[in-house]
Image (spheres, coloured by chain):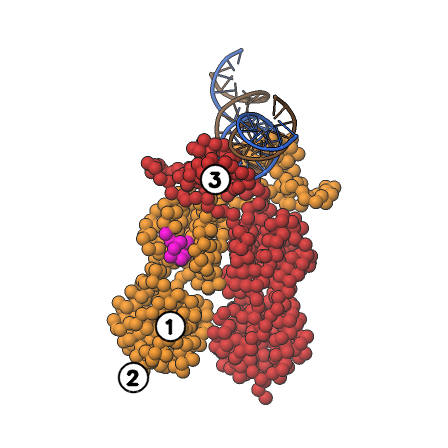
Chain colours: A orange, B red, C brown, D blue
Amino acid sequence: MTHESYGAYESHGPGRRSAVRRPASIKDVAAAAGVSATTVSHVLSGNRPVNEQTAARVRSVVNRLGYVPASLARSLQAGSTSVIGLLIPDISNTFFAELAKGAEDAAHDLGYGLILCNTEFDADREDRYLGMIRSRFIDGMVYASGSPPSRRRLEALMGKFPIALADEEVEGLERALIATADHEAGGRLVGEHLRALGHRRALMLTGPRALKSGVARANGFVRAFRGEVVERAGDFKEGSGYRLVAELVQEGGLHGDCTAVFAANDLMAFGALTALREAGLSVPGDISVVGFDDIRAASLAHPPLTTVHQPAYDVGRTATAQLLQYVTRGEVPPASRHTLPVELKVRGSTAPIAR
Amino acid sequence: MTHESYGAYESHGPGRRSAVRRPASIKDVAAAAGVSATTVSHVLSGNRPVNEQTAARVRSVVNRLGYVPASLARSLQAGSTSVIGLLIPDISNTFFAELAKGAEDAAHDLGYGLILCNTEFDADREDRYLGMIRSRFIDGMVYASGSPPSRRRLEALMGKFPIALADEEVEGLERALIATADHEAGGRLVGEHLRALGHRRALMLTGPRALKSGVARANGFVRAFRGEVVERAGDFKEGSGYRLVAELVQEGGLHGDCTAVFAANDLMAFGALTALREAGLSVPGDISVVGFDDIRAASLAHPPLTTVHQPAYDVGRTATAQLLQYVTRGEVPPASRHTLPVELKVRGSTAPIAR
DNA sequence: CTAGATATCCAAAACGTTTTGCACAACAGG
DNA sequence: CCTGTTGTGCAAAACGTTTTGGATATCTAG
C-alpha cells in the first residue's frame, strides 16, 4: 500500500464543524510550520537530513493538522501505485478464495494492495479490469483462469505490463510467469488409484476444452488409467456435473458400464454425486467418484470425496510473490514456471470394483 | 473503475523495440495531432464540442499511439479514485467470500474497483488498510467485522470518511450505515426449533463476546429456547468448536446433560461434529447440532447441518450499494440500517430428543 | 455595417506530492 | 585569508490529467 499514516487525523483546536473541509495538504503543513513543502517532505520521508529542531516543529504541526500525505499525488510522482489486481472468475469458489488469500498475503507482505477482479467469466468485465493495467492504475496483474476470449487480449498486454498467470496456463502464452499446480500429476494419481482398485472403464468429466489445466488433468489420467475412458465436457460448475451424469444414467450408459467417474473439479463431482444418488446408485458401492481441488466441502461431503488436493493458497501466493519481484524493480517479468505439487486424498467415495 | 480504454495499445509504425518506452501521454497525442492537450481531452471526454474533422484526426493519433489516459492523474484532478475497500477477516471463509462477491458486484455495477483487505483479525493489518482511506487512496470502505481494537480507530474515521458496516455492528457505532442479517431472529428460530423438538438444555458456542452479531444470536436463542443454556465462548474457528466440545465431553458435562449444541457459526459446528463423533456420540441420535451461516459445506456435511441461512451475498451487496450511493455524491453517509431476513434450514443434524 | 451569438481552440491553473539543483551560512584546514 | 566541506533549507520542475476563462474567427440578425 505505502499508504502509511504519518499522524493522527484528529483536528484539535477551536475547529468549528464546517460543512466540508479540505484535508490538510503538505503546503498547509509547510505554511503552519514556517518552512517549505520540500522540508516537510524531507522530514517525513527522511530522504535528506533536516535540523532536528525544525523537524520537531514540523512533526508537531503534522500531528495537529492530522496531515496524511495524499497517496494519489505520491503515486503519480512515483509512477507506480503499489496496487496490483487479481483476476479470477469466482471468489465464492473456495478454490479461488484460497488462491486469493495467498495472493493477498503475498501482496500485503510487500506493502501492496490487491484489487479483486471477479469476472464470472464475463469477457466485458475482464476487459474492463484489464483496462486498469493499461491506464496504469495497477502495477501488475495476477491472472487466474479467465475466459478464452479475454486471453487473446492478454497476449497483447503480456509483453508490456507485468502479468503473472496463476493456476491456469494460457494457450499460446508459454512465455510468461506461471505458477500452477501439477495438474498432469494429479490426473495421473487418480488414474493409478482407480486402476489399482480394479476399474477399467471410467467416465471423465472435463472442463471447457480451452483450459489447459483441465486438459493436463485429463491427459495425466488417461495415460495412467490405461483403460477405456468416456469423456464429457462440462463447465466446472456443479450443475454441469449433475446434468452430464443424469443424461448418461438415463441413456443407461453408466451403470454396469463405467464403474468410476473422474470429475475435473470437486464441484462437478458433487453434481455427479447428487445425480447418482437420485438414480439410486450407491457411491462407492456401485460407482466410485473422484474429484479435483479438495475444496473444504470435499471432506465433509457424504461420502467424503476422494480428490486431488491442490495447493490453492500456495499457487496464489507464489504467483503474486513472483510477480512482485519484478514489479518492485519496474521490470516486466521473464518466462518462468513454478509447478507446485499436488496430493491424492483417498476418502470414502472410491472403492475396489465390485465383481 | 473509470479506467476505460480509449483505444488499442498496439503501436504500429516502424517502432524499434526500445528498452523501456514511456507510455504516450496526452501531450504526445496533442503534439502529434497538432492540437492542444485541452482539445485532446475534450475529444475524449466529450465535455465540450470539437470540430469533427479535428476530432477524427485526434482519434486516429490516439489509436496509433495506443494512448490510454493515466487514471492516476485523472483521479488526482478529480479528487476521487473510484475505488473502495472491503475489509474482512478471512476471504477463505465462504461466508465472507460470498459477501465479497456481493460487494464486488455492487462496486462493479457503478464502475468502482474493490480492494480486498483481508485482515486475519490482525490489528496492525487493519490499521494499515484503514490508512488507505485516510490517505484518500480509496473513496470509501465496507467494513465487515474487524477486530475489537481496530473498531476504536474506526470511530474516529467514521464521521470523516464514507464507511459502511456490513454483517457486523460495531459497539458504540450505532450511528452508521449498516447492512446486517437479522442475527437475533436467526437465534430465535434456532431456539424455537430446538424447543419444539423437546430439547430443554443446550450448549451454546458463542463467538468472541465483543461481536454484537454473536451476542444477538445468543440473545435471540436464549429468549426463544426458554430452557437451560450453557455458554462457552469460541473464536468462530473450527478448532475452537472442536476444543470446547471435546473439553466438555471429557468433563462428562455433555452427554445425558445437554441434548443439543448451538454453534454461533457453521465452522464451529463442524468442529463440534468432529469432537462428538470422536467421542462416540451420534448426531442427531444422542445430540442435535445447529450451526449458523449456511456455508456451502453445511448441506454437504454428514449429517447435513441444520443451520440458519444468512444472506451473505445480499449483505455485501447492500452495504456496498448503500455506501456508494453517498460516495458518488461525495457525501458522508448518514445513519441507516438495513436488516436482511434469515432462514432456518432444517437438515439432518437435529432430531427430537431421545427419551 | 455592426453588435452579438456561435464555433473552435488554446493557455494556464489546479490537483498534491517528490526530487533536483542551488543558495547561503558556518566552519574547518591550509 | 582563501578554499573546500558540511549543514540547512528553498524554488522550481516534474508526474498527467481536467477545467476554466479567454481569444480569435465566422456567422447572424438588425
> Which residue is identified by label 3?
A79
Q: Amino acid at mark 3?
A: Gly
Residue A97 picture location, percent across and down: 47, 61
Q: Is residue A267 magenta-colored?
A: no
User: Looking at the picture, which amino acid does disc 1 mark?
Assistant: Leu
Tags 2 and 1 touching, CB below 8 Å:
no
Query: Looking at the rendering, which quadrant does residue B213 occupy?
Result: bottom right
Compared to B48, does B225 lie above or below? below
For marks 3 and 1, the one nearer the N-term is 3
The residue identified by callout 1 is A244
Chain bearing tag 1 is: A
A151 inside magenta stretch = yes
Taking the spot 58% from the left edge, 76% from the top edge, the residue there is B261
Position above or below: A321 against B290: above
* A140 relative to B102, above or below: above
Please tell me which residue is depicted at 64% across the width and 65% down the height of the picture: B339
CA gap, disc 2 to disc 3?
Answer: 68 Å
The numbered dot on residue A355 is: 2
Viewer-closest of B283 and A23 = A23
Question: In the rendered picture of this protein, how many numbered marks are placed on residues?
Answer: 3
Task: Point out the residue furthest to the left here.
Answer: A226
Indicate which disc residue B266 carries: none
Q: Which residues are magenta?
A: A143-152
